Image (cartoon, helix red, strand yellow):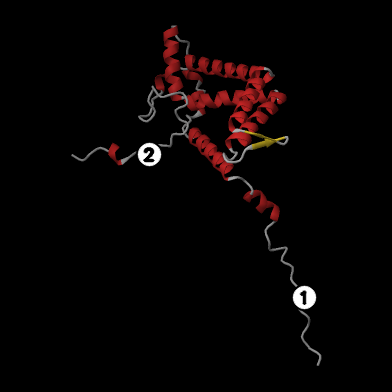
Amino acid sequence: MVSTHPPVLPISSTATTQPPIVTAVVESQPPAVRAFVNGVTETVRGGLSRSRPWSELLDRSAFTKPDSLSEAATRFRKNSSYFRVNYVCIVALILGFSLLAHPFSLILLLCLAASWLFLYLFRPADRPLILFGRSFSEYETLGGLILSTIAVIFFTSVGSVLISALMIGMATVCVHGAFRAPDDLFLDEQDPAAAGFLSFIGVPAVAPSASSAPSPV
């Protein structure tokens, strides 16, 4: 007896499945790397959220010549407390442009940072480092990385590029802090003048609490 039903054709499921390459890349990322990237991202985002308006930083009407060296030092101390996030951004930008202008130093610095991250920080403690068929202990790995860091910084152009960029950045910050009159700047209660230059790193934003509200009479 011949069946009158048409034959059922197989349906390919390639159109509905997720590309294996994307899934493999996402799942193959180590948890330590994800935690490190998330921590750095949150730290940078939290620090940038505390930056002052750049129009306030570059207000030309507020620039006056200090009468004495002590007044310049007082201005710099107040401005560094108020604009400390902006000053760090300025130094970081100058450092980044200096490294981009010297690609060889940038490549060496990136290789050095990658060596520290993947050979020491992100490597499991119970798994020894094996290179060229030889196993290296924890102290040997740390000693090799320290010697490599000293060699890269002091025996290549990386050290001179970093030092010159930091000096230019600090000079720019000092000139701005000395000539910018801080009379119209007011620090918040959570940002005291005695706070450190990098005190914004790793500190979460403080929301006004109920204890700071005036008590009913």
Quadrant for the C terminus, please.
Answer: top left
Badge 2 marks a residue whose secondary structure is: loop
Residue found at x 65% / y 53%: 23
> Residue farthest to the left?
217
Dot 2 alpha-carbon crowd within 10 angstroms: few under 14, some 14 to 19, many 20 or more? few
Name the foreground residue: 213 vs 18. Answer: 18
Contact between marks 1 and 2 (CB within 8 A): the answer is: no
* Three-letter code for the amino acid on which mark 2 is drawn: Ala
Badge 1 marks a residue whose secondary structure is: loop
Instruction: Measure how far apart labels 1 and 2 are at the Cα level.
Output: 63 Å
Q: Quadrant of residue 97?
A: top right
Q: Is residue 47 left or right of residue 209?
A: right
What numbered label is drawn on residue 207? 2
Q: Position of residue 51 (x, y in %)?
A: 48, 30
Q: Is residue 63 left or right of residue 7?
A: left
Task: Look at the picture and state if 162 lies above or below 208.
Answer: above
Q: Is residue 52 left or right of residue 121?
A: left
What numbered label is drawn on residue 9? 1
Residue found at x 63% / y 23%: 147
Residue found at x 45% / y 11%: 72
Q: Quadrant of residue 105?
A: top right
Task: Look at the picture and state if 195 lies above or below 119.
Answer: above
What numbered label is drawn on residue 84? none
> Residue farthest to the top?
68
Task: Look at the picture and state if 150 lies above or below 40.
Answer: above
Name the foreground residue: 54 vs 130. Answer: 130
* Three-letter code for the amino acid on which mark 1 is drawn: Leu
